[in-house]
Image: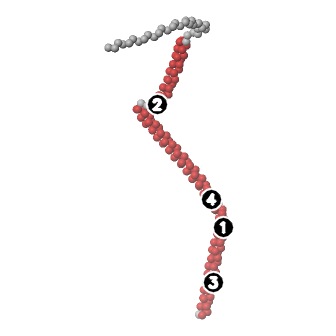
Amino acid sequence: MVKKLVVKKLKSVAMDSQLSATIRDSAEQIWLAGLGAFAKAQEEGTKVFDALIREGEAIQKKTRKVTEDKVTEMAAKATGTWDKLEQVFEGRVARALNSLGVPTKADVAALSKRVAELKAEVEKLNGAATRAAKPKAAPARKPAVKVVKAAKPAKPAAKPEQKAAA
């Protein structure tokens, strides 16, 4: 029986050492796999980092383009809105000025044109009137000789009458 126990014990120890060797081998393999992963990460880490930078730049370009498109679209809408607002404002101001009797730009332009036409007409008439009023130039005459008569002696001045004292 002792022999059986010793054999059993030896078998159990052998199994334990075999199990222990298997666990040790597994742990060593896990350790080596970790080291391999670390080395691979170091080796390819810069490649992965560079790839991430390229992807980030591509996303930034896409986002910038979308943003610029949206800004352009919103600016166009805002410009259209401002144009409509400006037209409404100009229309209201024009109606208010018209109701006050203020002439429009077209009215002033028409009046200016008419004044220019009338001015031309007046100048035309004035030119015809001056030509008609100018006498024909008379031939040059000899200067007339003035006859100077001798002066008569002047009469003495009359004395004023004296008033009688009353």
Q: Position of residue 87 (x, y in %)?
A: 47, 38
Q: Nearer the viewer, residue 53 or 3?
A: 53
| SS of the residue under disc 4 | helix
Please name which of the two marks, 3 or 1, marks the residue nearer to the observer. Answer: 1
- Residue under circle 1? 42
User: Between marks 3 and 1, how big is the CA–CA gap?
Assistant: 37 Å
User: Residue drawn at (48%, 8%), measured in percent from left and top?
Assistant: 155
Q: Amino acid at mark 4?
A: Ile
Marker disc for residue 17: 3
* Among the two numbered marks 2 and 3 on one chain, the one whose residue lies closer to the N terminus: 3
- What secondary structure is found at the residue carrying circle 3? helix
Distance between the Cα atoms at labels 4 and 3? 52 Å
Mark drawn on residue 102: none
Q: Position of residue 156 (x, y in %)?
A: 47, 9
- Looking at marks 3 and 1 on the same chain, the residue that comes earlier in the sequence is marked by 3
- Comparing 10 with 28, the one in front is 28
Distance from disc 1 to disc 4, alpha carbons, whole Å, reads 17 Å
The quarter in which the C terminus is drawn is top left
Q: Which amino acid type is marked by label 2? A: Thr
